[in-house]
Amino acid sequence: MPTVLRRDGFRFAFFSDEGSPREPPHVHVSGGGNEAKIWLEPDIAVAENYGFNAPELNRLVWIVREERERFLRAWHEHFR
């Protein structure tokens, strides 16, 4: 599970076996025993959430918006 970013106590990563064309690029976020999956395309959106509260999710989406290009670059470099 390559880590792309650690920020504000959260780990942003993706699973190495997820580069199939069935799913659009996304990032998994973990922190404080919670996890979420956030789509990067076509729009940034929470796909799954396991334990984060609404303010935490809002913060995660804000970080993903800010770092989206980094995440997409890492995704495409890893899965090419």
Image (cartoon, rainbow, N blue to C red):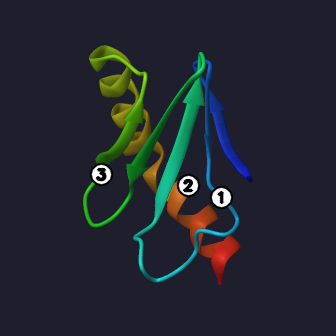
User: Which mark identifies residue 15?
Assistant: 1
The residue under label 2 is 70
Which secondary structure, mark 1?
loop
Image check: 17 left or right of 72? right
Q: Residue at x 34, y 26 (%)?
A: 57
Q: Residue at x 30, y 25 (%)?
A: 58
Q: Which label sits in the foreground, 2 or 3?
A: 3
Badge 2 crowding class, 10 Å Cα cut-off, few under 14, some 14 to 19, many 20 or more, is few
- Badges 2 and 1: C-beta atoms under 8 Å apart? no
Front-most of residues 62 and 79: 79
Q: Earlier in the sequence, mark 2 or mark 1?
A: 1
Q: Earlier in the sequence, mark 3 or mark 1?
A: 1
Q: Residue at x 57, y 19 (%)?
A: 8
Q: Residue at x 44, y 46 (%)?
A: 37
Image check: 79 left or right of 51? right
Which secondary structure, mark 2?
helix
The residue type indicated by label 2 comes to Arg
The residue under label 3 is 44
Which secondary structure, mark 3?
loop
Badge 1 crowding class, 10 Å Cα cut-off, few under 14, some 14 to 19, many 20 or more, is few
Which residue is situated farthest in the front direction here? 50
Q: Which label sits in the foreground, 2 or 1?
A: 1
The residue type indicated by label 1 comes to Phe
Q: CA distance from mark 3 to mark 1?
A: 18 Å
The residue type indicated by label 3 comes to Ile
Where residue 79 appears, as percent x and y from the top left, is 65, 77
Badge 3 crowding class, 10 Å Cα cut-off, few under 14, some 14 to 19, many 20 or more, is some
